[in-house]
Amino acid sequence: MGADLDITLLARLLLASLLGGILGLEREIHGRPAGFRTHLLVCLGSCLFCISSVEFYRIFGNFSGTAPVGVDPGRIAAQVVAGIGFLGAGAIIRDRASIRGLTTAACLWVAAALGIACAIGLYYLAISVTVIALVSLLLLKQVEKALNKDIYLTVKIWGDDNEQFVTRVYESLISCGIDHIDAKFDKNVEQQRMFMEIQIKRSKKGNVSDIVSSLSLLDGVKRVRIE
């Protein structure tokens, strides 16, 4: 009986490693920092935590009926869900006006869930979720590319300090069909220079070079940069 149980637990760990590795392989192919090995280890680790929790319940629980069981098998699994948030947060990177790594963080979260599912014997659900996750990552990415999404950029403009500078910049952006969201100003009184940093929203179909060209032609503009 003990040997059969050990083989079952080993099979669960191996399946968790396989499913986590498959999910991480997609991230690895797309050059994400949390890739094949990270997802495999997250899935394997969460599976082991959950198996250990179930074994604590089985070994140390009081099943005589004379007293409470005294062991909560879901406590460790709950901590896995909370703890994986720290690892997922490390995969999220703020890059100026955009944020990268949200999908990778979500994959790590799913990998932890797959490990828990494998640990308690929900093989069919674990395999199904892996397939659904892969289809979402691979196929829906093509759908996202076809969508005309809004893109957020940061425009930095250096120029001469005069009354019409800001107005001309805004008019130029409007002529390019750009909505400005937020703006910051830095005025150098001694050198009579003005610096503007503007958060803008544009359509995916728009051309960044058109924005640069339009702003560069304004009187008094010395330098333009878009990030």
Image (cartoon, helix red, strand yellow):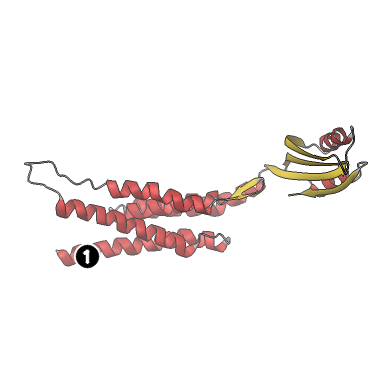
Residue 199 placed where, x, y %?
72, 40
Q: Secondary structure at mark 1?
A: helix
Residue 206 visible to an observer of this rendering: no
Relative to 89, does residue 48 appear above or below in the rendering? below
- Can residue 84 be seen here? The reply is yes
Quadrant location of residue 188? Answer: top right
Q: Name the side, left or right, on which 195 lies relative to 62.
A: right
Q: Considering depth in this image, is 143 or 201 the residue closer to the camera?
A: 201
**Residue 13 versus residue 61 in the image, above or below:** below
Residue at x 53%, y 63% (from the top left corner): 28
Locate residue 70: give its quadrant. top left
Q: Residue furthest front?
A: 190
Looking at this view, is 159 or 15 the one in front?
A: 159
Residue 214 percent location from the top left of the image = 87, 43
Q: Around disc 1, counting alpha carbons within 10 Å, would you say few (fewer than 14), some (14 to 19), or many (20 or more)?
A: few
Residue 137 % position (x, y): 53, 53
Which residue corresponds to the image point at 28% horizontal and 46% vertical from the top-left?
Answer: 75
* Residue picked out by circle 1: 6
**Residue at x-position 15% and y-position 49%:** 61
Residue drawn at the location 22% of the way across and 65% of the way down: 6
Comparing 23 with 94, the one in front is 94
Q: How many marks?
A: 1
Would residue 204 appear left or right of 161 to someone viewing this image?
left
* Closer to us: 49 or 40: 49
Q: Return the x and y of residue 57 as percentages of the image width and height.
A: 19, 51
Quarter of the image with the N terminus is: bottom left
Q: Is residue 116 left or right of residue 97?
A: left
- Residue 95 versus residue 24 in the image, above or below: above
User: The disc labelled 1 sits on which kind of residue?
Assistant: Asp
